[in-house]
Image: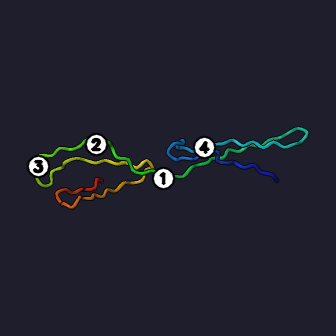
Amino acid sequence: MTGCFIFVCRKLDYESIPSTGYRLRVVATDHGATPRFGKVWVRIRVTNTNDEKPQFQPMPPERVTPSKTVDSVITTVIASDPDGDGVTYKFYVDGNSLLMISSLV
């Protein structure tokens, strides 16, 4: 019995391949007087790994007047993960507690 190998010949990236993966048709032919052949479909799916960082939507600088009331929304920050994973938000303040963040669901 002999076999053949299927090799990776360039970097695989889950985000840039078809959602169905790859399908290869492999044909084996014997060396008989009247060659006969068999065929099979091989399906290869590339799994998603967490190799992409979340991307934020572009935001212009925000201007806020001192008359804003407590609990007023200043802006909405939106990020998404190209890997399709969920995103959580953390907020770091430069030593003051005038601003806060609330996670979106």
The percent position of residue 49, horizontal first and vertical second, equals: 50, 54
The percent position of residue 89, horizontal first and vertical second, equals: 31, 56
Q: Are marks 4 and 1 in contact (CB under 8 Å)?
A: no
3D distance between C-alphas at marks 4 and 1: 20 Å
Amino acid type at image mark 4: Tyr
Disc marking residue 68: 3
The residue under label 1 is 51
3D distance between C-alphas at marks 4 and 2: 38 Å
Circle 4 or circle 2, nearest the eye = 2
Amino acid type at image mark 2: Met
The residue under label 4 is 22
Mark 1 Cα-neighbour bin, 10 Å: few <14, some 14–19, many ≥20: few
Amino acid type at image mark 3: Lys
| Helix, strand or loop for disc 2 | loop
The percent position of residue 104, horizontal first and vertical second, equals: 28, 53
Disc marking residue 10: none
Mark closer to the chain start, 4 or 2: 4
The residue under label 2 is 59
Mark closer to the chain start, 3 or 1: 1
Q: Are marks 4 and 2 in contact (CB under 8 Å)?
A: no
Mark 2 Cα-neighbour bin, 10 Å: few <14, some 14–19, many ≥20: few
Query: Which quadrant would the C terminus be assigned to in this image?
Result: bottom left
Q: Residue furthest left?
A: 67
Instruction: Please tell me which residue is depicted at 31% across the width and 47% down the height of the picture.
Output: 78
Instruction: Please tell me which residue is depicted at 19% across the width and 48% down the height of the picture.
Output: 74
Mark closer to the chain start, 3 or 4: 4
Q: Residue furthest right?
A: 33
Toward the viewer: 86 or 91?
A: 91
Picture mark count: 4
Amino acid type at image mark 1: Asp
